Amino acid sequence: MLFSDIAILDENFEVQTGCWVGTVEGRIAYIGTEAPTPEEAARFGEVYDGDEKLLVPGMFNAHSHAPMTLLRGYAENLPLQTWLNDRVFPFEAKITDEDAYWATVLACAEMLRYGTVSFSDMYYHSRERVRAVTECGMKMNACEGLLAFEDKPYAEYPISALNEELIAEFHGSAEGRILIDYNIHAEYTSTPAVCADIAALAKAKSLNIHVHVSETKSEHEECKGRHGGLTPVRYFDSLGVFDVPVTAAHCVWVDDGDIDILAERGAFVASNPVSNMKLGSGFAPIARMLERGVSVALGTDGVASNNNLDMYQDLFVLALAQKGANLDPTAVSPAGALRAATRTGALSQGRADCGHIALGAKADLAVLDASGPSWCPATDLLNNLVYAGHGSDVCLTMVDGEVLYRDGVWETIDVERAKAEVEVRTRRIIASV
């Protein structure tokens, strides 16, 4: 495709107008302020009119639980531990492989509608999640959720063998769109021996780890009580977890020492501001993290605690919540928030050639219609994008150069069937809980 005379969010997260961007074989092959010659243009195929449009990198959702579309609106107005133990865990025990498949398809449809191209997903039923995402054409870093309470080595848990199968079958599959990570659900749902074993395996195989860290004050303080004053970050660091690339979800209650460790170890923090606010967990110190060099990405969490997968909503909240929490209107700039939602999210997944508009980068792109009233006047398109734009302004989503969503049409998903399947399956589960 050749995007013609279009405004773009460039690799420095600045808006440039009157640009031409061409994609070939899944990558960005041309960026310029002048139209390519007719001979050059022929290789791009369709010419897309960029009038009153803005071309941006697709969103990279750094922390999600896609099959939880089944639980949308089910467990509400509860603190995290009550929400998990009394509502979520009993519901999840009833989810079948096919339930997870259709719930993931629906999640993919929602994410594509709002310009998300890739997501890091922590859940169960991994084969069915991979099947859904592969068919839908998106990218995913999948990890099988680990709950380990018994005093035995990781190798004696059934998930150990399953993970090796998943890595062998799917890591790098779908032309690199599917990657497999290791998982530690959290400190309070695992043992030190298991965490150390997973850290060693991930290091040996050069794979990433995805883990919940310091989501709530009680989690943070109880960890210190169990482990001689060690916070979750210090606890995981003592076990070698941060010796490999880690996506640490939430990090709401981390202290200054934790932040220093996260920065020194090169960990990625997946901030989930909407979910954290909805569950009453608090406000992560994102501004402090950025000041100290921590790589901050953006996630939605699951829809049971969000309740949607519109990353533009989370982008808006990330930028605004930090200003309010820090009493500082300069905290987290629009460019900083956008970087978290795109480039840093891609890097957290180990996708170095993704997440920005640059020559040679993967063509993971979204087009927003900037003609609506909330975009006028166009005094500063960057500010409009973060503070006035909406996910509903997305009119095209492209992954690896393939258009998967355009003007209300999903090219790879039967959305009506996905909605019907999830509705029926949710009702069945609720009736049996």
Image (tube, helix red, strand yellow):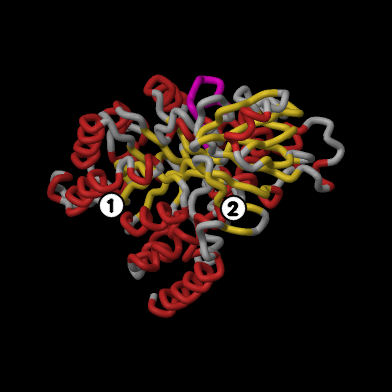
- Image coordinates of residue 285 in percent, x first then y, are 55, 32
Does the magenta portion include 123? Answer: no
- Quadrant occupied by the C terminus: bottom left
The residue depicted at 75 percent of the width and 28 percent of the height is 17
**Relative side of 324 to 247, left or right:** right
Q: Is residue 332 visible?
A: no
Report the span colored magenta. Answer: 286-297
- Image coordinates of residue 35 in percent, x first then y, are 71, 27
Q: Quadrant of residue 180?
A: top left
- Quadrant occupied by the N terminus: top right
Q: Residue 147 carries which label?
A: 1
Q: Is residue 69 visible?
A: yes
Other-residue count near label 2 (Cα within 10 Å), few / some / many at <14 / 14–19 / ≥20: many
Residue at image mark 2: 405
- Image coordinates of residue 192 in percent, x first then y, are 22, 39
Viewer-nearest residue: 69 or 107: 107
Q: Nearer the viewer, mark 2 or mark 1?
A: 2
Viewer-nearest residue: 241 or 87: 241
Tell me which amino acid carries mark 2: Tyr
Does the magenta portion include 295? Answer: yes
Viewer-nearest residue: 119 or 136: 136
Tell me which amino acid carries mark 1: Leu
SS of the residue at dot 1?
loop
SS of the residue at dot 2?
strand
